[in-house]
Amino acid sequence: MVIRPISTAEVPQVLEASIGTTWESMSRGEQAMTEYESLGPRVRSIIDRLLGLGGTILVAEVGGRLAGYITTGVLPNDLTERLEGMIFDTWVHPSCRRQGVGSSLIRAAEDYCRDQGATRATMVVATHNDASQRSALKSGYRAERVWFGKDLL
């Protein structure tokens, strides 16, 4: 397995996967207010913002094929003012799951954040994504906050 920064040629494939993971991570209320087809430009904008802030997308390659990706960046924590790594989106191709690809991507993202000066990292995981929660826990992350949402209309 090789983990490296994304290439320009891989952006469309990663964008497509990211749209899917974004949709899956959205609450039912968010999904009800959004057309799946409209997510492409929004997800691309989020990725562009992340990359513009010095973040990166790392990809895992197995046998010359894309096996997974992870998006990460480093931002100052508003409370502590220390640099903190943020892992936003992790995806592993279904045929490569449960083979260590996700764990390897998380370690590579942590290394990237550490190299950028981060002293800790946090990971965003949807409350209904049990597999990602298990992966986060296995990698040493612990729940620190829970966000609650409510539709007002």
Image (cartoon, rainbow, N blue to C red):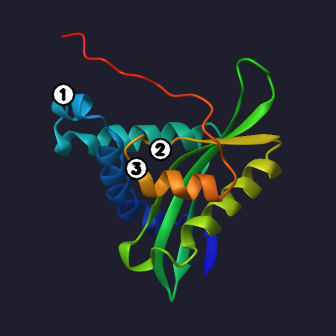
Q: Secondary structure at mark 1?
A: loop
Query: Residue 65 appears at what percent x and percent y?
Result: 45, 82
Disc 1 marks which amino acid?
Met
Q: Is residue 79 above or below residue 64?
A: above
Residue 151 in the figure: left or right of residue 114: left
Q: Nearer the viewer, residue 70 or 134?
A: 134
| Residue assigned mark 3 | 129
Residue nearest the observer in this picture, 50 or 71: 71
Mark 1 vs mark 2: in front: 1
Q: Earlier in the sequence, mark 1 or mark 2?
A: 1
Residue at numbered disc 1: 33
Q: Pick out the residue farthest to the bottom.
A: 63
Earlier-in-chain disc, 3 versus 2: 2
**Is residue 50 shown above or below 66?**
above
Residue 3 location, x and y as percent?
63, 72
Q: In the rendering, which numbered label is found on residue 104?
A: none
Real-space CA distance between mark 1 and mark 3, rounded to the nearest whole angstrom: 20 Å
Residue at 36% in and 65% down: 13
Which one is in front in this view, the residue at disc 3 or the one at disc 2? 3
How far apart in space, not on screen, are marks 3 and 2 (Cα)? 21 Å
- Which kind of residue does numbered mark 2 sit on? Ile
Mark with earlier residue (1, 3)? 1
Q: Residues within 10 Å of mark 1 (few under 14, many from 20)?
A: few
Q: Which residue is mark 2?
A: 47
Picture coordinates of residue 54, whole percent (x, y)? 66, 42
Q: Quick one: 101 or 46, which is closer to the camera?
A: 101
Residue 103 spot, x, y in % from top left: 61, 66
Q: Residues within 10 Å of mark 3 (few under 14, many from 20)?
A: few
Disc 2, SS: helix
| Residue depicted at 36% across the width and 52% down the height | 21
Callout 3 amino acid? Asn
